[in-house]
C-alpha cells in the first residue's frame, strides 16, 4: 500500500497559492501538487486561499438558479443514472411545449430568472427542433430572462441553432475521463462514443458558444485523476480559444432508481469534495463553481464559504417535478430547501444571494468575461447587479422573514453606496424591472 504524502516544506505549496491569489491559471504540475497533498493543516491553508480567490473574483455573491427537466426518455444506458434506457421501473415523460412553459412560469413566479434546461439524450424526442420550440415559448410567455441548456452533444450546425434561440451556457459533462471506466458505464447509445463526447466543447465553441459548462461525475473513478483530467481539458480550450469553461460543476455520484453504480469503490467523501471545489477554484480562478442539490444542506453551506459561486435551489430532477412532484428522478436530492430558505441561509453566512442574468445580455462572455474576472473587475458589477435583482425579488416574490431580512440587507447596502443605488431601488419600487449594469 502506498504511503501518504506528508509535505514538510510548505513553501512550494504557498507559492502555488500565491499564484492563484494573483488570479493566474495554474499549470498541471501545480494542480498535481495540490491534489497530492495529505497534510490536513496545509489543506486548511488551501481552503482559505480558495475562499479568498472566490471573494477576490466574485465578491460575496452567490448566484441562484433552478434546473427544468424536460424529459427522462433516454436512448443511452448509463449504469449510474435513473433515466437510463435499461431502467424498466422508470415512469417516462417528455414535457410538451405547454407543460414546459407552465413549469417555467411557476418558477418565474417564485422569483427565478435563470433556468437550466435539462433533457435526457434522445435525438428524436429532444433534438434541436424540440429545444428551439421550448426556448422560444419560455422566453415569449414567462418572466425567465436567461436559459442555459444541459442537453445531448450535437453537430456544429445544430449548436448554431441552439445558440441562436437564446441559450446562454451550453453545459455537458464528460462524466469520467478514464476510458476503460467510461466504456464500462456507457454500454450503448450515442453516449458510448467517448471521442464524440470529448469533442463536444470544441463544436459548441466553434458554433458560437462563448460560455460553456463542464464537469465530471465524481465517484465513477479516482477523484484526483478526474479533477486533473478535467483541468487539463480546460487548459487545452484556453490555449486554443482564449477562454475555457464559464462554469465547472461538482456533481457527486448519488443513488438513483435503477442504478447499479451507487456503491462505487471510488466513493468521494465530504472532505474530498471540499478539496475538489478548492482545487477547481484555485486552478481556474475566473470560473464559476457550481454545486447542485445532490449535496446535503450543511455541506452546501460550507462549500459556499469555501469557493462555490453558483448553486441551484428548490430543485426537482424529474419532468413535471415542480407542478406535480414528477415520478422518476435522475438522482436523489440532498438539499430540499426552498429558494427562500436558501436565500436566508446565504444572508446568514454573510453572503449575498443573486438572481442576476446581466452578463449574458451585456456580452460579458468568453474571453471578455475571463479578462474582466482575472482583472478583479467583475465582482463590482456582480455585487450591484445582485442587489438590484434582490430589490426586485423583495418587491415581487419575497414574504415573511426573508422579506424583512432582504430589506435590512438592502438598506445597509444603500448606506454604503455612493453610486446612486437608492435611486435605482426607487425605480424598481415604481415598477421598473430588469435594471442591471
Image: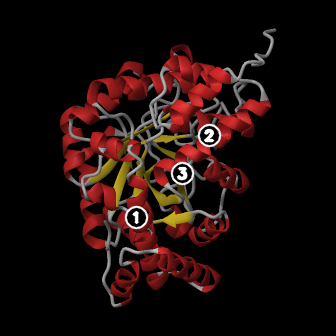
Vertical relation: 203 (above or below) 247:
above
The earlier-in-sequence mark between 1 and 2 is 2
| Rendered image: mark on residue 356 | 1
Identify which residue, 373 or 87, lies in the foreground. Answer: 373
Question: Residue, x 54% and y 16% (percent of image)?
Answer: 29
| Rendered image: mark on residue 55 | 3
- Quadrant location of the C terminus? bottom left
| Rendered image: mark on residue 49 | 2
Q: Secondary structure at mark 1?
A: loop
Alpha-carbon span between mark 3 and mark 2: 10 Å
Vertical relation: 110 (above or below) 25:
below
- Is residue 254 among the parts visible in the rendering? no
The earlier-in-sequence mark between 3 and 2 is 2
The earlier-in-sequence mark between 3 and 1 is 3
Q: Is residue 309 left or right of residue 255?
A: left
User: How far from the left and from the top, in percent, is residue 282?
Assistant: 54, 35
User: How far from the left and from the top, in percent, is residue 358?
Assistant: 33, 61
Q: Between tags 3 and 1, which lies in front?
A: 3
Amino acid at each position: 500500500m502506498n504511503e501518504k504524502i506528508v509535505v514538510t516544506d510548505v513553501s512550494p505549496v504557498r507559492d502555488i497559492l500565491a499564484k492563484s491569489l494573483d488570479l493566474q491559471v495554474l499549470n498541471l504540475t501545480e494542480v498535481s501538487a495540490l491534489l497530492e497533498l495529505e497534510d490536513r493543516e496545509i489543506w486548511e491553508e488551501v481552503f482559505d486561499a480558495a475562499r479568498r480567490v472566490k471573494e477576490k473574483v466574485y465578491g460575496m455573491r452567490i448566484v441562484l438558479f433552478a434546473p427544468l427537466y424536460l424529459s427522462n426518455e433516454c436512448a443511452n444506458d448509463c449504469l449510474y443514472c435513473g433515466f437510463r434506457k435499461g431502467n424498466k421501473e422508470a415512469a417516462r415523460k417528455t414535457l410538451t411545449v405547454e407543460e414546459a412553459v407552465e413549469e417555467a412560469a411557476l418558477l418565474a413566479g417564485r422569483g427565478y430568472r435563470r433556468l437550466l434546461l435539462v433533457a435526457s439524450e434522445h435525438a428524436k424526442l429532444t433534438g434541436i427542433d424540440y429545444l428551439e420550440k421550448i426556448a422560444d415559448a419560455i422566453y415569449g410567455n414567462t418572466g425567465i430572462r436567461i436559459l442555459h441548456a444541459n442537453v445531448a452533444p450535437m453537430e456544429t450546425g445544430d449548436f448554431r441553432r441552439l445558440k441562436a434561440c437564446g441559450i446562454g451556457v451550453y453545459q455537458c459533462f464528460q462524466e469520467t475521463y478514464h476510458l476503460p471506466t467510461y466504456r464500462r458505464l456507457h454500454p450503448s447509445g450515442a453516449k458510448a462514443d467517448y471521442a464524440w463526447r470529448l469533442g463536444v466543447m470544441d463544436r459548441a465553441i466553434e458554433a458560437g458558444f462563448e460560455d460553456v459548462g463542464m464537469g465530471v461525475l465524481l465517484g465513477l473513478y479516482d477523484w484526483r485523476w478526474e479533477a486533473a483530467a478535467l483541468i487539463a481539458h480546460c487548459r487545452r480550450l484556453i490555449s486554443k480559444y482564449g477562454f475555457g469553461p464559464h462554469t465547472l460543476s461538482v456533481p457527486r455520484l448519488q443513488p438513483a432508481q435503477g442504478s447499479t453504480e451507487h456503491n462505487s469503490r471510488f466513493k468521494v467523501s465530504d472532505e474530498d469534495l471540499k478539496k475538489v471545489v478548492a482545487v477547481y477554484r484555485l486552478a481556474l480562478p475566473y470560473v464559476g463553481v457550481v454545486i447542485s442539490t445532490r449535496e446535503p444542506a450543511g455541506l452546501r453551506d460550507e462549500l459556499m464559504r469555501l469557493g462555490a459561486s453558483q448553486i441551484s435551489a428548490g430543485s426537482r430532477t424529474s419532468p413535471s417535478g415542480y407542478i406535480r412532484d414528477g415520478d422518476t428522478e435522475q438522482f436523489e436530492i440532498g438539499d430540499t430547501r426552498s429558494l427562500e430558505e436558501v436565500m436566508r441561509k446565504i444572508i446568514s453566512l454573510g453572503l449575498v444571494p443573486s438572481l442576476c442574468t446581466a452578463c449574458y445580455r451585456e456580452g460579458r462572455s468568453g474571453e471578455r468575461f475571463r479578462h474582466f474576472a482575472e482583472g478583479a473587475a467583475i465582482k463590482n458589477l456582480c455585487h450591484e447587479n445582485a442587489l438590484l435583482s434582490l430589490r426586485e425579488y423583495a418587491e415581487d416574490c419575497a414574504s415573511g422573514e426573508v422579506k424583512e431580512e432582504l430589506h435590512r440587507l438592502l438598506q445597509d447596502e444603500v448606506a454604503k453606496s455612493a453610486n446612486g443605488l437608492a435611486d435605482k431601488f426607487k425605480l424598481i419600487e415604481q415598477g421598473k424591472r430588469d435594471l442591471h449594469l
